Amino acid sequence: MRKVLLIMALSTSLAAAGARANPFFETWDTPFGVPPFDRITTEDFEPAFMQGMADHTVEIAAIAADPSAATFANTIEALDTSGALLSRVSMVFSCLIGALTNDELQEVARELAPQRSRHRDEINLNEALFARVNAVYDQREQLDLNPEQRRLLSETWKGFVRGGALLGDPEKEKLKELNQELSVLSLKFGENVLKETNRFEYVVGERAKLDGLPDGVIAAAAETAAERGHPGQWAFTIQKPSLLPFLQFSTDRQAREKMLTAYTQKGNHGDELDNNGILARMAVLRAERAHLLGFDSHAAYVLDDNMAKTPDAVYKLLDQVWWPAQKKSKEEAGRLQGMIDAEDGGFELQPWDWWYYTEKLRKQDFDLDESMLRPYFELESVRAGLFETVRRLYGLTFKPRPHLPVYHPDVKAYEVLDREGSTVAIWYSDYFPRASKRGGAWMDALRKESYRDGKRVIPIIYNVGNFTKPTADQPSLLSLDELTTMFHEFGHALHGMLSNCRYQSLSGTSVARDFVEMPSQIMENWALEPEVLDFYAKHYKTGERIPSALVEKIKAIGHFNQGFETAEYVAASYLDMDWHTITDTEPRIPAEFEKASLERIGLIPEIVVRYRSPYFNHIFSGGYSSGYYSYLWAEVLDADAFAAFKETGDIFDPATALSFRKNILEAGGSEDPMVLYERFRGQEPSIRPLLERRGLAD
Ligand SMILES: [Zn+2]
């Protein structure tokens, strides 16, 4: 009934708008069925979401009201394949809201957030539906299911229970309210961070104020100034590719302070973009929701579904790494202060000095600075090196597909082929910052892999980054950090592209949060291996290979600044855990709460936690609440997993690569992650390789 009404309402509005067809309601006849980005407009989303939810509701009602007895096929499998239109529009929407957003799109997101939240809850809390899921679950021992089917059944059942299916009616209503409010707040939080990032600029009129900055950075700043309406000057922003080189190289101490302060005060100005009230409220709502669902805290609720299982296990891991890292960061601060004193600086080391003096120290100790490396890390060459790495490991080749529709000219499309020449996936990359893109780097899917009628549905995967942009006379030259980030995100992409699971709810990166970072982080290990450097590290002008002396230096420098890197990251992981192990529903004052959290672990004042609460997107606007520790958890696994390659004496060892592909990359969430891991490794992981890698072992 509702569906019919909606279609009528829709056709009326379409007639009024000149009857342009909504691409979401058509079969996509594009190559590989990729989204027809060239025809999708902002106005298409709202009707497509409404129709998608309406269709899904009808499908769910049919599954719940099926007169025949509940079976694995008519209930569990049917749920897995339901909601096709809704997931299609959601995936395209989520791609654009992250990478090419605008006010109208954000308006659609805001308007729809409560409805989308309610829609999810109405499924999770549908009693007739859960009764059928539960009936199948109760017979699980008698059913003849393979491991993937058993996993789908248990995950589906658990999803309902975690979504509130066992609650009484008043609690169910309360849960819906909490979820709706949280969905709106988390959206607003992310919007504010983006607006804060875009509104700051530091414009310089005199060339003398650019002292110390490398030529490429100056050229990029001139282009940024022109784009922002200050031709003939130089402009710097707090997007990472602009901020970090400024902090590393500018001799203007006051300007460094101004830039870093702008970055660390995002969302903290007491105005309409202030995030303090939002996050304090979110912490309360999350604690309330956890209580409803029978947990002490939000962290206890989240971790119950992760490898770590409990907050205690997470704190234990953090403690193991924190204390050696804190000690090392103090030593590093001492050395930096020593440099300041040696040049008669007459001041105490401050956070905005750290990058600058670290760069100087790196130059002094290793005769190496970032600007010596960048010319060898030209983005297109690095991309070719990545392709060669995965050709050697997994036999994949990447064929440019310049005619596939894309959402922005920076996006590049590839068809990914197997050794036998069959199509494995479609991969898009979108690597440069712009005002319409949120910060950071990520991977996601526009279509997930699964099997339909016995045939593999090819996944469509994309990587987004915010890397150094090319300028008029220089290509994109990456920093070391950008280089490893590119490998990292490509690792996530492989997890999505090589997935070979029957069910989409289990495929690709549909795994525990603290496992999902393992396939991405392991890719970082290949980036700087000499054999891999040989694939890509060529001077962008002369084509000369990176000199072996420079490679030796990169290797020698392995543990440099690791006290800082580890401390700023682990401190953010503690902060995340502290926000989410709150067991009462008393609102906190974020500045005070954060201060207490960081004082408790003794983060030295010269280091700012990697994300302060008002712009901690991962935990207040992304999916990483009580999950920021995941990178460290996964690092235990990836260091141990890469050791398996190393032990063979060949980082491309075919048998190890095949085992990693079969047991990890193809397996998605089809079995318990520790079972998958041990099948690959043949034993439990050890923390030792991680401590050694970071130079933190005794
Ligand atoms: Zn990642």
Image (cartoon, grey):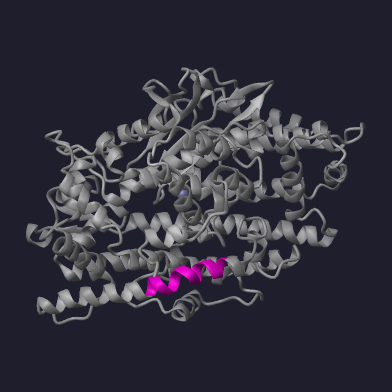
Estimate the x, y position of residue 495 in percent, counting from the top left: 51, 38
Horizontal arrangement in the rendering, residue 663 relative to residue 199 (left or right): right
Q: Hey, which residue is sitting farthest left in the picture?
A: 208
- Examine the rendered structure and indicate whether residue 111 appears above or below residue 595: above
For the C terminus, the quadrant is: bottom left
Horizontal arrangement in the rendering, residue 47 relative to residue 528 (left or right): right
Work out whether residue 191 can be spotted.
Answer: yes
**Point 31% across, 69% down: residue:** 261
Q: Assess whether residue 317 is covered by the magenta stretch.
A: yes
Residue range highlighted in magenta: 314-326
Q: Residue 502 lies in what quarter of the image?
A: top right
The number of discs equals 0
Characterize the magenta stretch by its predominant secondary structure: helix
Estimate the x, y position of residue 408 in percent, counting from the top left: 38, 33
Work out whether residue 435 can be spotted.
Answer: no
**Point 17% across, 51% down: residue:** 371
Which is more toward the observer, 412 or 236?
Answer: 412
Horizontal arrangement in the rendering, residue 228 relative to residue 317 (left or right): left
- Examine the rendered structure and indicate whether residue 653 appears above or below residue 316: above
Horizontal arrangement in the rendering, residue 164 relative to residue 308 (left or right): right
**Point 29% across, 57% down: residue:** 558
Q: Residue 199 lies in what quarter of the image?
A: bottom left
Q: Assess whether residue 607 is covered by the magenta stretch.
A: no
